[in-house]
Image: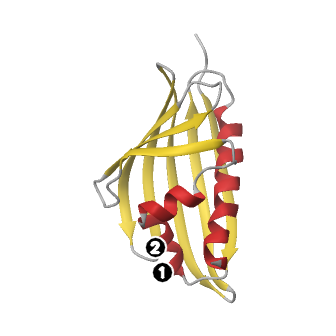
Amino acid sequence: MTAITHATIVMDRTYNASPARVFAAWADLDARKRWSAPADDIRIEYEASDFREGGRDLSRCIELGNADYVAQVFYLDITPSQRIVFAEDVSHGDKRVSAALICVELMPADAGARLTLTLQIAAFDGSEMEKGYQFGWSAALDNLGKEFAR
């Protein structure tokens, strides 16, 4: 039996955009498709997207030569321009590998908006999913900043 691995990761970014504009980049599916993939050789494809409290997203993280990671997101709390809280259930191939509670907080900052992302992860398979979350979300948040250079 593999033990559950727990991790908490906190990431901060400051963007040259208002909290409302940063929030809009999360709410808009086309924008999310642009910034959410962590690398050029990885695609995120959405099979369903319902960005609202009680809504659900279903997406695939596709990397050539690797089984897809399938993420189901359940939106628990959304306050426009302030916060997004969701639970995420991730499978790899036919095996559930992790669950996470993810909180996005947006606050005004001198340069525009400060975003704090807190991930609380439970990994079920010993695959060090927390490293995947760290890599993926860090790159995605860096990509999000590019949305405001347009």
| Label 2: element kind | helix
Q: Give the x, y percent position of residue 20.
A: 48, 81
User: Quadrant where the C terminus lies?
Assistant: bottom right
Q: Nearer the viewer, residue 63 or 141?
A: 63
Percent x, y of residue 33 = 51, 56
Render colour scheme: secondary structure
Pointers 1 and 2 in contact (C-beta within 8 Å): yes
Q: Is residue 119 left or right of residue 13?
A: left
For residue 16, what is the image quadrant? bottom right
- Residue drawn at x 47%, y 44% is 45
Residue flagged by tag 1: what amino acid is it?
A: Ala
Farthest residue to the left: give it.
54
Front-most of residues 51 and 148: 148
Q: Horizontal and vertical percent for residue 133?
A: 64, 43
Q: Amino acid at mark 2?
A: Ala
Residue 24 disc label: 2
Residue at 61% x, 70% y: name it. Answer: 115
The crowd level at tag 1 (other Cα within 10 Å; few <14, some 14-19, many 20+) is some
- The alpha-carbon separation of the residues under discs 1 and 2 comes to 6 Å
Q: Which mark is residue 123?
A: none
Whole-percent x, y for residue 114 in the image: 63, 76
- Which residue corresponds to mark 1? 20
Most distant residue in the bottom direction: 110
In the image, residue 36 above or below residue 21:
above
SS for callout 1: helix
Image quadrant in which the N terminus is located: top right
Frontmost residue, 68 versus 8 = 68
Q: Residues within 10 Å of mark 2 (few under 14, many from 20)?
A: some
Q: Is residue 144 left or right of residue 91?
A: right
